[in-house]
């Protein structure tokens, strides 16, 4: 006869229930807290600049959370709309020319602008793929996020050496926002099917949370797409 599994003592079961509940509740509570803190932080910055006529707090006996965030989003969208035409572009150019005359401010502005353009540009492939490289030595593998082809002087110098390199970001565990910028030969990077978000979860959990992967089903799906008849021109 099969041996019956031993029942855990009540204290052990309560401990397991508590840990399971903590795993469920802690991320929800932290996410809610950070979201609420961000909303209140933006409200504290934006609401003082909103005219009282348009501020709902003027007419209500309570404060409306998130109004400052909505106002900021609308303002940013309007600025983007105005920048798209000739007059707005001219005003932006005049403002940037004034900033170029300020030594310290000029460096800060150009650096921040380049970062935002790289991260937010629609044509950029920044951090769209996850990959594997051998790091910190041969035989040890690390997850990286592919940024872009190596550009600028570094890209030119490496091309002179006959190397086709890509810029990758090597995140650290458990904080994927810190890490190292590496320039790796394209052939040394193994592209993964998992998304950047799935790779980030794996890094944060130190490998405890790994996305499901079924290569046979994926291969069948790709073969099916190839076999599908193409519409006549």
Image (cartoon, grey):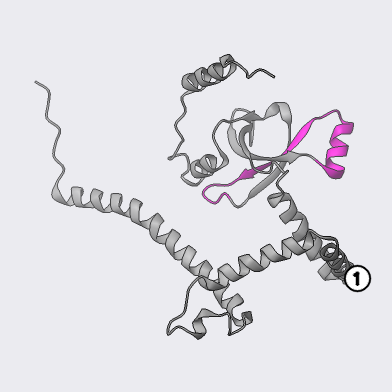
Q: Which residues are magenta?
A: 151-176
Q: Position of residue 38 (x, y in %)?
A: 53, 67
Q: Quadrant of residue 71?
A: bottom right
Q: Could you tell me which quadrant the C terminus lies in?
A: top right
Image height check: is 186 above or below 208? above
Residue 30 is situated, as x and y percent measured from the top left of the image, at: 43, 60
Residue at image x 72%, y 56%? 116
Residue 15: x %, y % from top left = 23, 52
- Specify the quadrant of the image occupied by residue 165: top right
Q: In the picture shown, does residue 51 fall above or below 187?
A: below
Q: Quadrant of the N terminus?
A: top left
The vertical placement of 9 against 68, above or below, is above
Q: Secondary structure at mark 1?
A: loop
- The total number of labels drawn is 1
**Left of 71 or right of it: where is 125?**
right
Q: Position of residue 137 (x, y in %)?
A: 64, 33
Front one among 151 and 227:
227
Q: Farthest residue toward the front?
A: 233
Residue 161 magenta: yes
The residue sitting at 79% across, 30% down in the picture is 164
Say which of 50 and 211 sits in front: 50
Tell me which corner region of the image, top left, top right, bottom left or bottom right, holds residue 197: top right
Residue 4 covered by magenta stretch: no
Left or right side of 16 for 232: right
> In the image, 159: left or right of 57?
right
Of residue 167 and residue 37, the one placed in the foreground of this image is 37
The residue indicated by pointer 1 is 101
């Amino acid at each position: 006869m099969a041996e019956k599994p031993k029942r855990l003592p009540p204290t052990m079961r309560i401990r397991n229930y508590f840990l399971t509940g903590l795993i469920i509740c802690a991320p929800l509570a932290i996410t809610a807290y950070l979201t609420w803190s961000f909303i209140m932080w933006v409200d504290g910055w934006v609401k003082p600049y909103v005219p009282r006529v348009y501020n709902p707090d003027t007419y209500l006996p309570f404060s409306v959370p998130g109004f400052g965030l909505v106002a900021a989003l609308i303002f940013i969208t309007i600025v983007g709309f105005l920048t798209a035409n000739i007059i707005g572009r001219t005003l932006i150019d005049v403002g940037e020319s004034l900033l170029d005359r300020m030594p310290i401010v000029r460096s800060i502005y150009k650096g921040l602008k380049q970062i935002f353009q790289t991260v937010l540009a629609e044509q950029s492939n920044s951090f769209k793929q996850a990959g594997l490289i051998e790091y910190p030595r041969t035989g040890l593998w690390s997850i990286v996020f592919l940024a872009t082809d190596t550009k600028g002087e570094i890209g030119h110098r490496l091309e002179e050496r006959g190397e086709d390199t890509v810029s990758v970001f090597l995140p650290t565990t458990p904080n994927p926002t810190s890490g190292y910028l590496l320039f790796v030969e394209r052939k040394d990077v193994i592209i993964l099917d998992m998304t950047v978000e799935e790779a980030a979860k794996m890094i944060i959990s130190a490998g405890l949370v790994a996305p499901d992967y079924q290569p046979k089903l994926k291969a069948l799906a790709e073969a099916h797409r190839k076999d599908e008849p193409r519409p006549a021109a």
